[in-house]
Image (cartoon, rainbow, N blue to C red):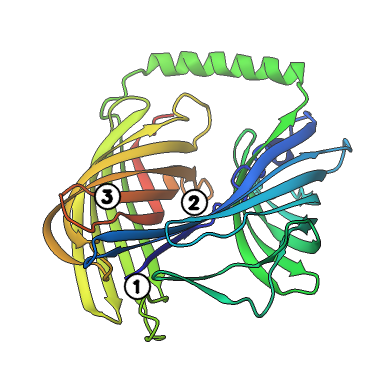
């Protein structure tokens, strides 16, 4: 099985500052900075020659924008792009571009406070690039990998237009998460739709009255926290999530009907250790099916601990880092689909967000996170596997806020 992981953290840090758009604050947005990035990685281990080949394609798009008008959510800015390919079996020239963009955010107040964290937006941008995508791009062969690389030159000569629309979610203060789709048009080239995910920040003018209010609120909140400063086993949570991952591209170029898919059902239980740290147990049931494998069920279980970076803040949102040690029989080894290997140990690392669902229950939270699991056993040809988490957590007792 070829491992081809595409993590489109497209526009990571793109709206990290539009928080005041989502609140009733009198502060004026001044400007925003950030970047979008997309990352694709593939690797292959040859058991006969004991050689590992890899290919990495990375795209980064920095940008900066300003809000020129006081009473409108209209933004103008400039952006750039740099894209490169790195591999031990092939090489390609770097790609780059410069451009301008304009964005408008629809500031419609809704009934529920949680829904007011969401805003619709639209964006137009145009770019001059040293490359363009066409309908008849040749398929490149690099060892076991096949990929397409756009037509390119040494100068900025290709014109590109993009139409973007989506949803911005206010995480906390100036931090915002964006989920959107982009329709990209290349003059005398092709057009296509691609997803974008981003996190961004906006700098704002200071408001003295607002700052004094925040300081007073923080002092009052500190007094309340001091009165109940015992967090050990004061809060518990139970969570469940379902993850679906698929691969429909084969390293065996003869078989065009190849597919592999897996479902992971995760159950976990955690308890608070102190205000910032919790610990618990998890069980992952992994169900797989594919062209070269029968339907199988694998089991991974272990212990984990989480550190909440937002623990001392007033928000109910959590931004956490997690480390876990696990045992199971899910063998990601060699070039084939995962198969059963007993008594495997895994180190899990990752993090994510926990967002409240106040319109349903004060104790119910959405879990959005990403984890990577690496086999600790000394096995030749092993590789790690990554899982996203979209689940629900329910808190018992007092949440550590």
Q: Measured along the vertical axis of the image, is residue 33 above or below residue 118?
A: above
Foreground of the two, 346 or 297:
346
Q: Quadrant of residue 250?
A: bottom left
Regarding residue 133, the answer to whether it shows in the image is yes
| SS at mark 2 in the image | loop
Quadrant, the C terminus: top left
Say which of marks 2 and 3 sits in front: 3
Q: Which mark is residue 360?
A: 2
Q: Measured along the vertical axis of the image, is residue 199 above or below residue 93?
A: above
Residue in view at x 79 percent, y 29 percent: 26
> Left or right: 176 with respect to 143?
right
Q: Position of residue 115 (x, y in %)?
A: 62, 49
Foreground of the two, 197 or 217:
197
Query: Are circles 1 and 3 on residues that touch, CB within 8 Å?
Result: no
> Left or right: 58 with respect to 254?
right
Task: Please tell me which of labels 2 and 3 falls first in the chain.
Answer: 2
Q: What residue is disc 3 on?
A: 374
Regarding residue 124, the answer to whether it shows in the image is no
Query: Are circles 1 and 2 on residues that touch, CB within 8 Å?
Result: no
CA gap between label 1 and label 3 equals 20 Å
Q: Position of residue 73 (x, y in %)?
A: 81, 44
């Amino acid at each position: 099985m070829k491992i081809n992981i595409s993590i489109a953290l497209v526009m990571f840090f793109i709206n990290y500052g539009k928080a005041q758009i989502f609140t009733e604050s009198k502060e004026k947005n001044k400007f925003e900075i950030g970047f979008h990035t997309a990352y694709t990685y593939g690797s292959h281990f040859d058991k006969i020659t004991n050689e590992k080949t890899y290919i990495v394609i990375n795209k980064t798009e920095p940008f900066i924008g300003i809000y020129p008008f006081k009473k409108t959510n209209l933004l103008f800015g400039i952006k750039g792009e740099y894209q490169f390919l790195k591999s031990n079996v092939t090489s390609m020239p770097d790609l780059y571009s410069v451009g301008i963009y304009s964005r408008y955010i629809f500031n419609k107040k809704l009934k529920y406070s949680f829904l007011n964290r969401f805003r619709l937006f639209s964006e137009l941008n145009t770019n001059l690039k040293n490359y363009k995508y066409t309908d008849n791009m040749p398929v490149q062969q690099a060892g076991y990998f096949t990929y397409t690389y756009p037509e390119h030159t040494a100068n900025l000569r290709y014109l590109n237009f993009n139409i973007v629309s989506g949803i911005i979610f206010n995480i906390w203060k100036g931090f915002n998460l964006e989920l959107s789709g982009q329709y990209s048009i290349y003059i005398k080239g092709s057009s296509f739709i691609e997803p974008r995910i981003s996190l961004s920040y906006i700098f704002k003018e200071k408001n003295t009255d607002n700052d004094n209010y925040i300081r007073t609120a923080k002092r009052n909140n500190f007094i309340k926290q001091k009165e109940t400063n015992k967090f050990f086993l004061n809060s518990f949570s139970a969570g469940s999530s379902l993850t679906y991952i698929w691969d429909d591209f084969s390293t065996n170029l003869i078989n065009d009907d190849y597919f592999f898919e897996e479902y992971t059902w995760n159950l976990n239980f955690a308890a608070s250790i102190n205000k910032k740290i919790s610990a618990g147990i998890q069980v992952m049931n992994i169900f797989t099916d594919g062209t070269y494998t029968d339907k199988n069920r694998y089991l991974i279980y272990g212990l984990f601990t989480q550190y909440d970076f937002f623990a001392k803040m007033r928000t109910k949102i959590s931004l956490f880092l997690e480390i876990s040690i696990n045992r199971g029989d899910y063998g990601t080894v060699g070039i084939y689909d995962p198969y059963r290997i007993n008594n495997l140990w895994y180190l899990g690392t990752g993090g994510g967000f926990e967002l409240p669902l106040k319109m349903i229950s004060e104790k119910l939270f959405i879990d959005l996170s990403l984890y990577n699991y690496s086999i600790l056993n000394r096995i030749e040809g092993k590789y790690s596997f990554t899982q996203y988490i979209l689940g629900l957590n329910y808190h018992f007792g007092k949440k550590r806020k």
